[in-house]
Every structure is written in C-alpha cells, then in structure tokens.
Image (cartoon, grey):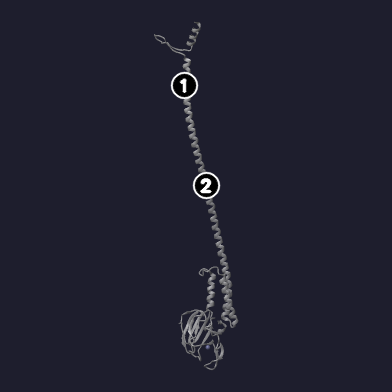
Amino acid sequence: MKKLTGKISRKRRNDLSFMFVPHRKGNIKTFRIANYRTTLLAVTAILLVALLAITGYTLSLARENNLLKAQHDLEIQALLEEKAKLEDYIASQTNELIENASLISAAATTKTISEKSVEQYKAEYEEMVLTYVDNNMSTIKSVSRGSSKEKSFKEALSDLRSLINLVQSAKLSEDTTNDKISKKESELTSYLDSLPTYWPVDNATTIHSAFGRRLHPVYKRYSHHDGIDIGNKRYTNIYAAGDGKVVEATRVGGYGNYIMIDHGNGFCTVYAHLSSYDVKVGDWVKKGQKIAKMGNTGTSTSTHLHFEIRINNVPINPVLYLEKR
Ligand SMILES: [Zn+2]
C-alpha cells in the first residue's frame, strides 16, 4: 500500500499547478498541468524546431544572397578586366599611332632634305656642264668664224660634235622643257645644223673652178673668184648647206637665178646660175633640203653651181667648211 502511495505522490510532483486567487470575494481557482515536464519538453522541442527552421531558412537566404553577390562580383570583376584590356589596347594603339606619326614626319623631313640635296647637286652639276660647254663653244664659234685654215674649222666641227655627245650623255632627263642641259644640247645642235657644211650637190665633189684669184672665163681678166664652181648636168638637185632663212631668191645679171641663205652667226651662202629655185624670200630651210636645180643662167659658160660662203659678208673658201659626203 505504502509503495502505491509513493508512486502516486511522485506522479503528483510531476504535475504543475497554477492557483488564481481573486482580490475580491470568490473562489480560488486551481489549474493543474499534469506531467508538466513532459509538456515543457514538448513545447521547448517545438520551439527549438521552429527556431531551427527559421534559422535554416534565414541562413539559406543569406547563402543564396552571398552566392548571388559572389556571382555578381565575378561578373563585375570580368567586366573590369575587359575594360582594363580595352584601355591597354587603346593605349597601345595610340602609342603606335604617335610612333607612326613621328616616323612619317621624320620620313617627310628626310625626303625634303634629300630632295633639296638632289636639286642642289643637280643645279651644281648643270652649272659645271654648262660652264664647260660654254667655254668650249666660245672657242668653237671663234674658230668657225675666223679660221682661214681648213684644219682649224674641221677641228672645231669635230670638237662641237664631241661636245654634243658629251651633253647628250650628261643629260639628267629627257624632259627638254625643264632641263638646262637638254636646252644646251638643242642650242649646240641648232648651231651645228646652221653651220654651212653640207655639200650642196649629190655625187659631185669635184671643183671645176676654185676659190681665189683666177682668169675670168668670160671677161678674160684676172679677178677674185668669190666661191667654187661645181659642174654637173642641167637640173641636178641643189641643197641648202645649212639651216637658215632665205634672204634672196631672184635673178640678177652676173649670178642669173640665185638664192642667198642667212644661217645666223654671220654666215651666209650663195647659190648661183640656177635653172630654177623652189624657195622664196622669208622661207626657213633645213640643212640638206632641196632648194633649186642646177643651170647656166647669168654670166656662165657651162651648166654649174657657183657656191659661196660669206662670213659677215666677206667671201671665204667654201672647201674649208663643206664636208665631203
Ligand atoms: Zn663661180
């Protein structure tokens, strides 16, 4: 019995009683929670579970948030890296541009300098060639006009041709409009072409009457023969001895039909006793151009060409000037 009582009282001690005592008149009310520890434990357990659940949820949210943040950070990091790369690229491109610009500028400067030098050397070279040519030309011109010896003029002619060859090989370009040496070449060639050197009759280098004092075939007295007589068949072609301008083309007593050509530099040539002529006063003729036909007009005893070369209107011996061909 005692044992049973003990068991009951132990059970009762496990209960929890709440007593409500009213201030005013009334009955005291007692609430008893049987086995309160168990109840307390259960409630605590429920609360703990709830707490755990809330904490877990909160933690998961936070973790998710952290993950997103980390992802975001990574994206930003990647973007920043891209930006840095772009900036580097732009910087390198800019540097390259600056470097190229300075290279181009340097090249342009070098070009300007070298162009200047080339122009300067060209001018000096031209000056040198022209001085050389002019010095030689003055000698050639004086010999051409003043020589009384065949050798001297022919030597001057040979020197002139050498000089023209020299000038041709000294030319810097084929552009004749802007090249001083080319202009000089034209000048020398014109001078050479104007010199009366072309034998005025084909295949007839024999002189029937020479230059100088002779017994005149018609007047039968000694006088000066101002030219040379070249005989051939009637109507044989006659050619200009050099480039020049026709200053006479007419008929006079002694000469008969005759032509005079002015070659410049004091030189003139005369072609007399012509049967006819193809040119008129004022015509420009080229060396070797056919200008007339041989005849027997004027004071003449047979068909021949009377040919003169005059320097400053003074007749000189044509054989000193004409070249056999
Ligand atoms: Zn004559």
Q: Position of residue 137 (x, y in %)?
A: 57, 75
Question: Compared to 43, does 285 lie above or below?
Answer: below
Q: Residue furthest left?
A: 25
Q: Secondary structure at mark 1?
A: helix
Question: Where does residue 87 sit, x and y in percent of width and height?
Answer: 51, 45
State the mark number for residue 89: 2
Distance Cα–Cα, label 2 vs label 1:
62 Å
Residue 62 location, x and y as percent? 48, 30
Circle 1: residue type: Leu
Say which residue appears at 53% left-offset and 78% top-offset. 193
Front residue of 7/15: it is 7
Residue corresponding to mark 1: 47
Q: Residue at 56% of width from left, 66% of height from top?
A: 122
Look at the numbered disc 2 and give the secondary structure of its residue: helix
Residue 299 circle label:
none
Residue type for callout 2: Tyr
For the point 47% across and 18% down, the residue is 42
Foreground residue among 93 and 4: 4
Give neighbour class at mark 2: few <14, some 14-19, many 20+ (Cα, 10 Å).
few
Quadrant where the C terminus is found in the figure = bottom right
